[in-house]
Amino acid sequence: PVAETIRKLEHELAEETGTNPTGIAFENQLDLSISKEKLLLYRVSYNELYRVLKTAFRENSVTMLHSYQQYLPINIAGNEKTVNRVLQETLVQTQPDNRGN
């Protein structure tokens, strides 16, 4: 029923706007995990890293669809850079050590 509702909404949006929605396939989704040990080693703030990654990957989540026991994010999609390119072009501010380095 949820997939049916989403397809109906996609069809209605396409009729209203003249543009077909871009889907995000499950295999194209990405889960990142942050190593707290590496954060300590390189003196990087978790909050700073989280903010930079969120900005780099453009947090485009509009809302969350709640269906039974599932929570599905509704995202704005489009032609984006590859994950490797985003990570290569992303810099994170480190914290100085006790000597200011």
Image (cartoon, grey):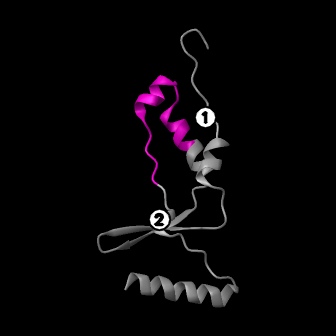
Q: Residue at x 65, y 67 (%)?
A: 78
Quadrant assignment for the N terminus: bottom left
| Residue farthest toward the right in the current orientation of the protein | 18
Residue 65, how many percent across, how many down? 42, 72
| Residue farthest toward the left in the current orientation of the protein | 69
Question: Where does label 1 land, which residue?
Answer: 92
Question: Where does label 2 land, which residue?
Answer: 27
Name the N-terminal-most of marks 2 and 1: 2
74 or 78: nearer the viewer: 78
Q: Is residue 84 above or below residue 6?
A: above
Q: Quadrant of residue 67?
A: bottom left
Tell me: 50 left or right of 85.
left
Quadrant assignment for the C terminus: top right
* Spatial CA span between label 2 and label 1: 27 Å
Which callout, 2 or 1, points to the residue nearer the camera?
Answer: 2
91 or 64: nearer the viewer: 91
**Which segment is the magenta one?**
31-51
Residue 34, how many percent across, how many down? 44, 40
Circle 1 sits in a helix, a strand or a loop, which is it?
A: loop
Q: Residue at x 70, y 86 (%)?
A: 18
Q: Quadrant of residue 66?
A: bottom left
Residue 60, how many percent across, how many down? 58, 61
Residue 99, how many percent across, how many down? 58, 8
Q: Is residue 62 above or below residue 54?
A: below
